[in-house]
Image (tube, coloured by chain):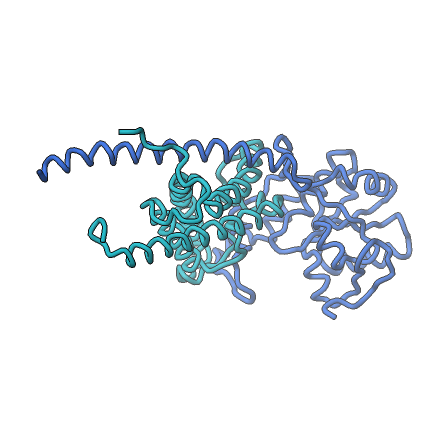
Amino acid sequence: MKNGQPSWKRAYVNMLTVLARWLLGAAFIYLGLNKALHPVEFLKLVRQYDLTQDALLLNSIAAALPWFEAFCGLLLLAGVAVRGTALTLAVMLVPFTLLVFHRALLLQAALNLPFCAVSFDCGCGTGEEFICRKLLENFALFALSVWLLAGHGRQFSLWFSLLKPPAP
Amino acid sequence: MRDHSIQSTVPTRRGAVGRISAEAALVAVVGIVFAFAADWISPRGLALARNYFPTGTNHAVRVAASAVPPGRIISTNSASPSPAQQLATRMQQEGLQLIGDHRAEQLFHDSHLKPGVVVFIDARDEEHYQAGHIPGAYEFDPYHPEKYFPVVLPVCQAAEQIVVYCHGGDCDDSETAALLLKDVGIPGQKLFVYGGGFTEWTNNRLRVETGERNSGNLRNANQ
């Protein structure tokens, strides 16, 4: 026993965390590549959020975001800079989810529908989806990212932490 | 003893938070560089400096239209113009003409009687064009115009009537394509935007052609 936890329990948590890391990594690679392979379609979807009228900025967001997600997914899958990547993803997911939520509210008002009946392609890489399901998916991705921040599951990692703590 | 352990863990935690934040910043910087490099290398990558949307499309209308379930009617103020009326007004302001399915069919028959005088332009992407298009229509993806201008431009210059279409509904690629053609010197009075687009064409069970233009692979829609 170490740190007040039986060793079998620690091993179980570590294994689950490794699986969570692989799942999150695979999810972001899938979502990122889905958009990166159809950049014009993604650009049109990003444009619908009316984030900016500046063509250069809009193009930059649509060009970089999918590949950035795929990059983070690759890092998680390989186990490189795991906690830093998890923090980046968690920080990214918050504004994205708020934007999707805001657009869903606009659609709900425009169409006079119950909130969960609102369905649209949010540009998340999963096609058209009902908003409540989308929000739950985003919450699950966020929760997995936060879990990885705890620092468990270092097995099968190439380079878990890029920045080592200073020697005592 | 307890106080001592708390004091010793606080700086460690702060150090860990700082290290994770620094690592996140490093991931973000390297990731952004990777992302732009990947877009630059990718054959499908976006050209950052290009304005892909020269149209002043009303997003609110498109947003609402894109989310309407089939068969559902949106309750609107009768005094305000419908999305279709707004679209027609906008086209007029842009110097384009919006046409419906009857006029499009009529022009399609004319295109057979007067080849080269009446032409159809398909403003969808290559994948959709290959899967099926209005017979004889020229492929013209407005997001990759440089690829199609060498063929499409001389055809449009010689034609007297040009019908541009995309999927229909909330799709504004036909409008984008028509404005692009107008920008390169095709007179607006020659340009007709078929609002119902390919969806309406197939719903009317008209003939479609698959593969390349004039491939001879004709079939009735929805077969």
Q: Colour of chain B?
A: blue
Up/down of B30 relative to B129, above or below: above
Q: Is residue A31 left or right of residue A147?
A: right
In the rendered image, is residue B199 in sight?
yes
Q: Nearer the viewer, residue A98 or B86?
A: A98
Q: Which residue sits furthest front?
A: A1
Task: Please tell me in which quadrant of the rendered image residue B207 appears.
Answer: bottom right
Up/down of B136 relative to A151, above or below: below
Q: Which residue sits furthest bottom?
A: B223
In the rendered image, is residue A95 in sight?
no
Work out which quarter of the rendered image holds the C terminus of chain B and state it: bottom right
Q: Position of residue B189 (x, y in %)?
A: 77, 42
> How many numbered discs, if any?
0
Task: Please tell me in which quadrant of the rendered image residue B152 appears.
Answer: top right
The chain letter corresponding to cyan is A
Q: Nearer the viewer, residue A66 or B95?
A: A66
Q: Nearer the viewer, residue A149 or B202?
A: A149
Q: Is residue B15 left or right of residue A145?
A: left
Work out which quarter of the rendered image holds the N terminus of chain B and state it: top left
Q: Position of residue A20 (x, y in %)?
A: 41, 54
For image coordinates 83% across by 38% down, the residue present is: B150
Up/down of B113 relative to A66, above or below: below
Q: Nearer the viewer, residue A79 or B69?
A: A79
For image coordinates 45% across by 34% down, the residue present is: B28
Q: Position of residue B2 (x, y in %)?
A: 10, 40
Q: Position of residue B191 (x, y in %)?
A: 76, 44
For image coordinates 37% across by 53% down, the residue present is: A17
Q: Is residue B91 left or right of residue A137?
A: right
